[in-house]
Image (cartoon, coloured by chain):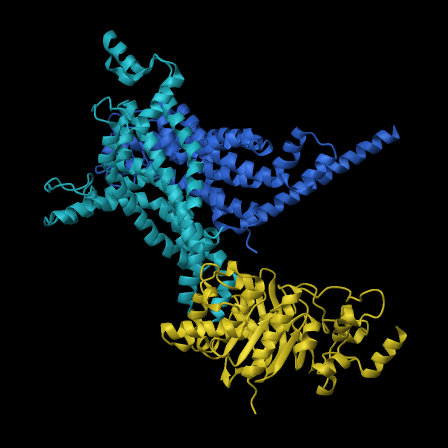
């Protein structure tokens, strides 16, 4: 098992180097003076220009710059934001919990509804129920989520007035941030109504972000179940006299989960891409919104660092998914 | 003379046979495709959208950027204060939404077509190379594709547009780049799969050249998954382009692109539902139609997934 | 006295894209405790389907009709799903052709045996484990304690089939159905598994229905043989008399295609194919491949008496005919 893990990690090294080359190259492939580009439209004095050139080492050979960039990354130095002057890594870690919280809630919704929907559709194959579940999930899969978010805001915030439009919690609550997860922090604070407020803030963005993964998981679960239900061992389980609840829920599902887990793992990239749109619509202070804001502010240092960090996270999650295969699928574990 | 005419006749016959074969393949394809009711509906909706895109300049009641300053945020005709002049209402600067939506269909379909063409052509070429030359070159290519796939696609497109500068063309290039690794992977996998088959060996023994082998023997045999992928990419391209437009990095106002229209309408969501609802609905319907078709195509083209 | 299993006039149709397909056509099956019945036929002759119908394991597009389907004095046609589950797996056990894929790859052998024990016998955890080890010992698996924690892919095909047998025997079934239990196994293992099945059958006085296409297996194991062709029962006899005097031309052909019975240089085979959904003959289904067939066989077909093995044939083969045929060859 340890060898398996090490091999997987080893395979990631070239990919990771490739990612750093892209993020490193991205400021440098821009036509024109990188310092001017970074400074944006505000303009610079010639002295400051020279100073920045020195500071970033743009006047040195490109390979030296790359080595230095790698060295900086290894020491955790992702540069400082041009706008806020704060280290990119610090900003990232202040905002990241908000994105994790949102993504986890979305993933929970997607799994909690997607897998049962897929199981029901598969076990009632061809029925009206199956057709409607698959129809709805195809609509979800085709959904432009930025529009879907706006639609939900119109209905639930505008017409019904049930949920707030933006942010993570109502401004009347103020408490110490301990975990970075608003749902947990609001509970820990012990303030009355704080948790409800946090919940009402997260529910719409989480639904919006969950939409596409939910549809994908439902479709994948259904097709995996259909395949597995035709297998010999399912027939054996039925021949034992097991109730169909147990045949489907234990014998078939365990096997069908293998491809579903893959899809869930692959959704993490989709989820982070979706977070960019969802966080923008709901003004959710996470890394998605941070990236969009930095792009429009031309804060390239942040864009560069953020891109690298997000890619690294996606890679790590995919690695973890690979490992969970071993836990679910004994055939892989023993190879 | 006689021999010549005989040869002619013979080759004509061959052509005819070829045509028959092709039409029977098409008939079989249509048989499986039309079995899927959703796919047929999707096809009809798609054809309808293509029609609208074509006739938009003649059929649209107003110009896409004509502003009627006396008719701002007019609701659709079935609502109070609606008028037949603006069937689906107007936006905040008095432009007719129906006309803009009709012109928007041109943009979305154009984006989809161009992006898929670029991504598929590039991806198939690179995939063929990576599959045929499986040594160092193939490995390097696949590593590069892995790197591209490590980024969330929308984020990478976003950053690329940020580098290239906002605009529809740049958005299309960026989306094409993030979509093509899928084609590379698919093509390469099929090529490697096909290369191990006996018919390739026999073509080689018969003296077929590499180029001939790739274009005439291997490519046609791995086209089905690529076609299915192309349909899926078509809808992804439309969605991503709209998302970039929505974030202000795709088509720029006053272009009647659906995503850009949504971005402009955002501040009116609580006042005028139609300026927000309708462009999004247009995106949803288009993407849904294409995805329905994609499901049908997969059923019809992929014998493995065909219901037995 | 009532038979343990009594099926009369069973027909099974499948709804397919091309209309109804009759997989089993008015067959009778009976089997009693301590008896070994072999059902023989080519693939597609409806051998397994009939047994799956008894178990209630057919897909939704199958339609089952029968005059009588009685097991242990219970009407299997009329009982609810819940009642059926109390019988199948407990009193009727079934093992399948592909032992490797018939065990769930995600669970250990122990889990799958204990699950059956828990379902049908209850018992507490320690008792279940003890019983599972006993069962594995019974079917001749060495080091059963460690094997309990093995996954199916870690075992060979023969081992998997032994596990399947152990699992089925867990509840002391009255009837064991073995659906081509040795087809997927190596020749050397086949005999071991068959001997195991037979000794267990004798020991527990079970009824055993052995579905096979291998006449050699039949000769070694069965008491009574029932031959099926294209969904119909064409002949039924005690095993000795069947091998001596087969009455249906199909049985005769099956027997003469056995390698050990071949007397020429060439191994005889039966020309043609089993009829499918769209080329079903009007009367006798074997007529197109039969050397005895006349024009009558395309109009009607007669079921012969018990004396002639209930052969479904207008011109059943008799002992003298065979002698003549043998002399000619």
Disc tally is 0
Q: Residue furthest front?
A: C143
Q: Nearer the viewer, residue A172 or C206?
A: C206
**The hue in which chain A appears in the rendered picture of the protein:** cyan
At a point 45% along the width and 54% down the height, the residue shown is A329
Q: Is residue A54 above or below residue C289?
A: above
At a point 75% along the width and 37% down the height, the residue shown is B14
Could you tell whether B72 is left or right of A134 in the image? left
Q: Nearer the viewer, residue C194 or C26?
A: C194
Q: Is residue A242 above or below residue A222?
A: below
Q: Nearer the viewer, residue B19 or C5?
A: C5
Q: Is any atom of residue A40 visible in this view?
A: no
Q: Is residue C236 above or below residue B233?
A: below
**The hue in which chain C appears in the rendered picture of the protein:** yellow
**The hue in which chain B appears in the rendered picture of the protein:** blue
Q: Is any atom of residue A132 visible in this view?
A: yes
In the image, residue A233 lies at what x, y percent? 50, 63
At a point 41% along the width and 71% down the height, the residue shown is C129
Q: Is residue A37 above or below residue A303?
A: above
Q: Residue furthest top?
A: A46
In the image, residue B121 lies at what x, y percent? 53, 30
Instruction: Quadrant for residue B236, please give it.
Output: top left
In the image, residue B247 lies at what x, y percent? 31, 30
At a point 59% along the width and 46% down the height, the residue shown is B29
In the image, residue B3 lies at what x, y percent? 87, 31
């Amino acid at each position: 098992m340890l060898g398996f893990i090490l091999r997987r990690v080893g395979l990631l090294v070239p990919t990771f180097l490739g990612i750093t080359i892209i993020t490193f190259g991205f400021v440098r492939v821009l036509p024109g003076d990188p310092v001017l580009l970074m400074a944006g439209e505000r303009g610079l004095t010639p002295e400051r220009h020279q100073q920045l050139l020195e500071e970033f080492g743009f006047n040195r050979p490109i390979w030296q710059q790359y080595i230095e960039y790698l060295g900086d990354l290894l020491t955790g130095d992702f540069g400082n934001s041009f706008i806020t002057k704060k280290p990119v890594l610090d900003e990232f870690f202040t905002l990241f919990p908000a994105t994790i919280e949102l993504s986890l809630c979305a993933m929970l919704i997607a799994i909690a509804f997607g897998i049962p929907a897929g199981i029901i559709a598969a076990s009632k194959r061809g029925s009206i129920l199956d057709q409607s579940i698959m129809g709805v999930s195809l609509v979800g899969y085709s959904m432009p989520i930025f529009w879907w978010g706006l639609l939900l805001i119109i209905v639930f915030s505008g017409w019904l007035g049930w949920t707030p439009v933006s942010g993570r919690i109502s401004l009347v609550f103020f408490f110490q941030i301990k975990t970075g997860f608003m749902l947990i922090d609001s509970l820990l604070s012990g303030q009355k109504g704080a948790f409800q407020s946090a919940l009402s803030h997260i529910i719409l963005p989480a639904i919006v972000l969950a939409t596409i993964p939910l549809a994908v998981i439902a479709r994948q679960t259904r097709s995996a179940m259909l395949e597995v239900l035709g297998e010999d061992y399912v027939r054996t389980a039925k021949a034992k006299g097991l109730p169909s609840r147990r045949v489907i829920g234990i014998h078939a599902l365990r096997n069908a989960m293998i491809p579903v887990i893959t899809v869930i793992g692959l959704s993490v990239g989709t989820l982070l891409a979706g977070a960019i749109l969802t966080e923008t619509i709901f003004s959710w202070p996470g890394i998605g919104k941070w990236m969009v804001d930095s792009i429009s502010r031309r804060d390239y240092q942040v864009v560069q660092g953020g891109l690298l960090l997000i890619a690294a996270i996606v890679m790590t999650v995919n690695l973890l998914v690979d490992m969970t295969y071993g836990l679910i699928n004994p055939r892989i574990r023993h190879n | 003379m006689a021999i010549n005419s005989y040869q002619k006749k013979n080759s004509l016959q061959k052509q005819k046979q070829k045509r028959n074969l092709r039409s029977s393949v098409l008939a079989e394809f249509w048989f499986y495709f039309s079995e899927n009711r959703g796919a047929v509906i999707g096809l009809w909706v798609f054809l309808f959208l293509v029609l609208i895109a074509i006739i938009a300049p003649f059929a649209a009641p107003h110009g896409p950027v004509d502003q009627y300053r006396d008719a701002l945020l007019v609701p659709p005709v079935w609502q109070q204060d609606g008028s037949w002049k603006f069937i689906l209402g107007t936006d905040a600067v008095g432009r007719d939404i129906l006309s803009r939506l009709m012109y928007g269909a041109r943009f979305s379909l154009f984006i989809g077509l161009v992006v898929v063409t670029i991504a598929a052509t590039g991806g198939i070429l690179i995939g063929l190379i990576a599959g045929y030359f499986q040594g160092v070159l193939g490995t390097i290519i696949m590593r590069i594709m892995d790197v591209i796939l490590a980024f969330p696609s929308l984020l990478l497109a976003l950053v690329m547009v940020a580098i290239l500068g906002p605009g529809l063309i740049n958005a299309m290039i960026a989306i094409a780049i993030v979509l093509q690794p899928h084609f590379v992977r698919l093509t390469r996998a099929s090529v490697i799969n096909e290369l191990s088959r006996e018919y390739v060996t026999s073509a080689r023994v018969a003296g077929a050249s590499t180029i001939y082998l790739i274009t005439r023997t291997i490519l046609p045999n791995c086209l089905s998954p690529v076609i299915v992928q192309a349909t899926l990419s078509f809808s992804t391209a439309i969605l991503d382009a709209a998302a970039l437009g929505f974030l202000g990095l795709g088509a720029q106002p006053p272009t009647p692109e659906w995503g850009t229209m949504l971005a402009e309408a955002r501040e009116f969501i609580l006042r005028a539902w139609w300026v927000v609802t309708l462009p999004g609905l247009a995106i949803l319907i288009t993407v849904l139609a294409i995805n329905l078709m994609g499901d049908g195509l997969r059923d019809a083209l992929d014998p493995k997934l065909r219901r037995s | 006295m009532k038979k343990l299993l009594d099926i009369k006039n069973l027909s099974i149709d499948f709804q397919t894209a091309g209309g109804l397909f009759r997989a089993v056509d008015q067959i009778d099956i009976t089997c009693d405790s301590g008896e070994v019945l072999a059902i023989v036929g080519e693939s597609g002759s409806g051998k397994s389907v009939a047994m799956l119908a008894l178990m209630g394991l057919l897909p939704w597009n199958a339609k089952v009709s029968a005059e009588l389907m009685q097991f242990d004095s219970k009407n299997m046609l009329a009982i609810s799903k819940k009642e059926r589950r109390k019988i199948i797996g407990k009193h009727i056990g079934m093992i399948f052709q592909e032992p490797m894929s018939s065990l769930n790859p995600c669970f250990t052998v122990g889990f799958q045996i204990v699950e059956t024990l828990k379902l049908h016998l209850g018992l507490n955890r320690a008792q279940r484990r003890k019983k599972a080890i006993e069962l594995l010992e019974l079917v001749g698996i060495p080091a059963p304690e460690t094997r309990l924690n093995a996954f199916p892919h870690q075992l060979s095909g023969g081992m998997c089939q032994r596990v399947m047998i152990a699992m089925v025997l867990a509840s002391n079934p009255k009837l064991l159905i073995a659906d081509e239990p040795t087809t997927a196994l190596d020749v050397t293992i086949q005999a071991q598994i068959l001997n195991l099945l037979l000794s267990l059958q004798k020991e527990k006085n079970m009824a055993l229905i052995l579905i096979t296409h291998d006449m050699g297996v039949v000769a070694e194991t069965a008491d009574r043989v029932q031959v099926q062709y294209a969904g119909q029962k064409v002949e039924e006899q005690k095993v000795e008399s069947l091998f001596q005097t087969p009455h249906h031309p199909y049985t005769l052909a099956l027997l003469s295609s056995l390698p050990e019975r071949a007397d020429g240089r060439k191994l005889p085979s039966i020309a043609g194919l089993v009829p499918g959904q769209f080329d079903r003959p009007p009367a006798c289904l074997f007529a197109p491949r039969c050397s005895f067939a006349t024009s009558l066989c395309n109009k009607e077909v007669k079921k012969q008496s018990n004396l002639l093995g209930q052969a479904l044939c207008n011109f059943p083969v008799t002992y003298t005919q065979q002698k003549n045929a043998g002399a000619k060859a």
